[in-house]
């Protein structure tokens, strides 16, 4: 299989970072304003480019579960942080409020995702550590 050109690699990077807009990606990769729409569309027809896009999306998706877990841990840490006995430090109330708000949104999203009805969340065991 042939190798990607530098311009094709740039196109792929911009395509994945700009919300999958081929015309904008083509312009950002250096194609002319006049031909950007045509070249963006043409690039998405090339098997080498399509395969590389699929590969990079797969790599990103493989990291989502880990990122999701880390995000929840950090929100939990901020939302429920309290000084340890004997230690004195200021708790950033704005960060705490934002983390609680994010957790609330996440839990609401989970309820909608799981059927949209009133779902009672029972948290125990390993799941309790996430929240």
Image (cartoon, grey):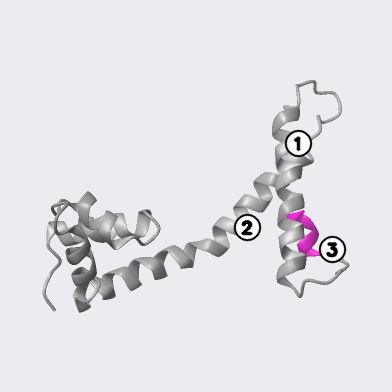
Q: Residues within 10 Å of mark 2 (few under 14, many from 20)?
A: few
Q: Name the residue under label 3.
A: 123
80 relative position to 48: left or right:
right
Residues under numbered marks 2 and 1 in contact, where contact means CB atoms less than 8 Å apart: no
- Which element is circle 2 on? helix
Q: Where is residue 92 in the image (x, y as percent from the top left)?
A: 72, 27
Mark 3 against mark 1, which lies toward the viewer? 1
Q: What is the spatial separation of the Cα atoms under label 3 and label 1, in whole angstroms?
A: 22 Å
Q: Which of marks 2 and 1 is nearer the N terminus?
A: 2
Magenta stretch encompasses residue 45: no
**Magenta highlight: main SS:** helix
Mark 2 against mark 1, which lies toward the viewer? 1
Instruction: Give the magenta-colored segment's residue range.
Output: 124-131
120, 32: nearer the viewer: 32
Q: Is residue 14 above or below residue 46?
A: above
Q: Earlier in the sequence, mark 3 or mark 2?
A: 2
- Which element is circle 1 on? helix
Magenta stretch encompasses residue 125: yes
Q: Position of residue 18 (x, y in %)?
A: 37, 54
72, 36: nearer the viewer: 36
Q: Mark 2 points at which residue?
A: 69
- Which element is circle 3 on? loop
Q: Is residue 36 above or below residue 96?
A: below
Q: Residue at the location (73% across, 50% down)?
A: 103
Quadrant in the picture for residue 53: bottom left
Q: How crowded is mark 3: few (under 14 residues within 10 Å), some or many (20 or more)?
A: few
Q: Is residue 55 above or below residue 76?
A: below
Q: Mark 1 points at which residue?
A: 97
């Amino acid at each position: 299989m042939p190798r990607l050109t530098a311009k094709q690699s740039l196109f792929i990077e911009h395509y994945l970072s700009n919300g999958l807009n081929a015309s904008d990606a083509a312009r950002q990769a250096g194609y002319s304003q006049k031909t950007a729409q045509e070249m963006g569309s043409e690039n998405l027809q090339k098997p080498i480019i399509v395969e590389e896009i699929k590969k990079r999306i797969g790599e990103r998706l493989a990291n989502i579960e880990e990122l999701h877990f880390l995000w929840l841990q950090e929100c939990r840490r901020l939302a429920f942080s309290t000084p340890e006995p004997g230690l004195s430090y200021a708790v950033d109330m704005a960060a705490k409020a934002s983390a609680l708000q994010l957790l609330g949104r996440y839990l609401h999203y989970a309820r909608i995702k799981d059927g949209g009805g009133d779902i009672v969340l029972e948290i125990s065991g390993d799941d309790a550590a996430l929240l």
